[in-house]
Amino acid sequence: MVRSTRIWAALTLLGTTIGVAAVPADAAPAATAQTTVCPTGWGSLPKTRSAATSHPVTNIRAGRHTCYDRMVIDVPGATAGRLGYSVRYVDRLYQDGSGRVLPVAGGAVIEVRVTAPAYDPATGAAVYPGRPGRPLPGVDLTGYRAFRDTRFAGSFEGDTQIGLGVRARLPFRVLRVDGHVVVDVAHTWTGKP
């Protein structure tokens, strides 16, 4: 009996260490359901990549996932290596060019800058329909766990600036893939959904 208790304790510790719950063989079927382990370690410090593209931003959209909320900035035609960004928490969102403070709802504000214009560089005509100081067109944040508000700050000298209001200062990551800059904001700091 002592030996089986020690083995059970060791299996439980091993399961906890690798993020999987150890379940005794005679447990009820409901207890064997897999739990989602969310990524951790993203942190909340600024994240930047230097690069620039003349391909314009055409769309900004959001999505909900089990562990995080996601914002995607579409820059068709731009390769990942040519997509630069600066993503950081700010006390206030200041609009480039004017310096005007743009209110963004939420417990914390993330400033997202993408080094791509929201206008056609050849003609100056707007490509993305966002209006400075207004919520992002077509982005409905109903039911989101981390996101609270969005604001289009504008596009100035080839950079597009967005305010993202979140529930609190949460960990985030930034990914670049061809034609897209992706900002994921975790629902929690704990690694649990």
Image: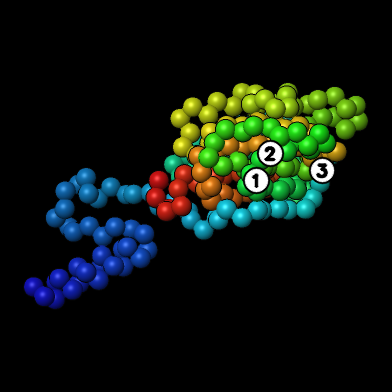
Q: Which labelled disc corresponds to residue 53?
A: 3
Instruction: Tell me the SS state at disc 3.
Output: loop
Direction from residue 11 to residue 175 in the image, left or right: right
Picture coordinates of residue 74, whole percent (x, y): 69, 35
Q: Which labelled disc corresponds to residue 105?
A: none
Q: What residue type is labelled 3?
A: Thr
Residue farthest right in this picture: 122
Q: Can residue 63 be seen in this view?
A: no
Q: What residue type is labelled 1?
A: Val
Instruction: Tell me the SS state at disc 2.
Output: strand
- Whole-number angstrom distance, CA of label 1 to CA of label 2: 7 Å
Task: Report the number of numbered marks.
Answer: 3
- Whole-number angstrom distance, CA of label 3 to CA of label 1: 25 Å
Q: Quadrant of residue 26?
A: bottom left
Labels 1 and 2 touching (C-beta < 8 A): yes
Q: Quadrant of residue 178?
A: top right
Residue farthest bottom in this picture: 3
- Whole-number angstrom distance, CA of label 3 to CA of label 2: 24 Å
Read off the residue under disc 1: 90
Q: Please name the residue shown 72% across and 47% down the image.
A: 85
Picture coordinates of residue 36, whole percent (x, y): 38, 49
Neighbour tally class for label 1: few under 14, some 14-19, many 20 plus, Cα within 10 Å: few
Mark 3 or mark 2, whichever is nearer to me: 2
Colouring scheme, one of rainbow, by chain, secondary structure, one colour:
rainbow
Direction from residue 40 to residue 33 in the image, left or right: left
Read off the residue under disc 2: 93
Labels 3 and 2 touching (C-beta < 8 A): no
Badge 3 or badge 1: first in the primary sequence:
3
Q: Please name the residue shown 31% across and 68% down the image.
A: 14
Q: What residue type is labelled 2?
A: Leu
Direction from residue 170 to residue 47 in the image, left or right: right
